Amino acid sequence: MACSKVRKIDRECRVFNEQWTRDYFFVPWKDRAICIICKENVSVFKEYNLRRHHETRHKEYASLKGAARDDKVRRLKGGLAAQQDALLRQSRANLAAVRASYKAANLLAIHGKPFTDGEFGKAMMLAVSEEVCPEKTDTFRGVSLSAQSMTRRIEEMGGKRP
């Protein structure tokens, strides 16, 4: 069987040109270009694709020139960075809540306690956190310690202990 001669976009090794940020309001993100105005992404680093997106969706930015354009790019990049940081922080908090849930399930299994004790443990955690560190109470609320979650976690661990 002969090799396929179909052109593969991801094998073209295209690189992002920093000038496109100023010209078309795009920044590189992973292997894509993201519009810092509308947050849409373009999957291929081709100037034509970026220019087409900019000219069809953001005509109002064509009048910005020089320092005004640079300032707008800087502000929009800052907004995108802040949004990505917020999402990353939320993701880390969710990951910490899941890890805490697994640790609680492991403790229940080690001590042979019923799965419903997780709910009681959560009620105690919330009561303590409201007194000791009220700013973290919402974080503790995000930890799933229901009987169903404890059952699922213990089954997933299946005898493995961290």
Image: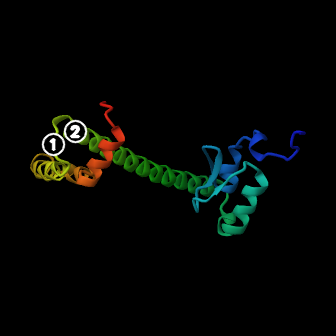
Left/right of residue 25 with respect to residue 156 in the rendered view: right
Can see residue 94?
Answer: yes
Asked where in the image residue 154 lies, by quadrant, the reply is top left
Q: Which residue, given by chain and number where applicable, does mark 1 sit on?
A: 113
Q: Is residue 20 above or below residue 53?
A: above
Asked where in the image residue 15 lies, by quadrant, the reply is top right
Residue drawn 10% across the image and 52% down it: 127
Give the residue type that dot 1 points to.
Lys
Residue 117 in percent (x, y) is at 15, 49
Residue 38 in percent (x, y) is at 58, 62
Can see residue 96?
Answer: no
Closest to the observer: 34 or 162?
162
- Give the number of the disc on residue 90: none
How busy is the neighbourhood of tag 1: few (under 14 within 10 Å), some, or many (20 plus)? few
Residue 149 in percent (x, y) is at 29, 51
Give the residue type that dot 2 points to.
Ala
- Give the number of the disc on residue 109: 2
Closest to the observer: 62 or 86?
86
Residue drawn 72% across the image and 50% down it: 44
In the picture, the quarter occupied by the N terminus is top right
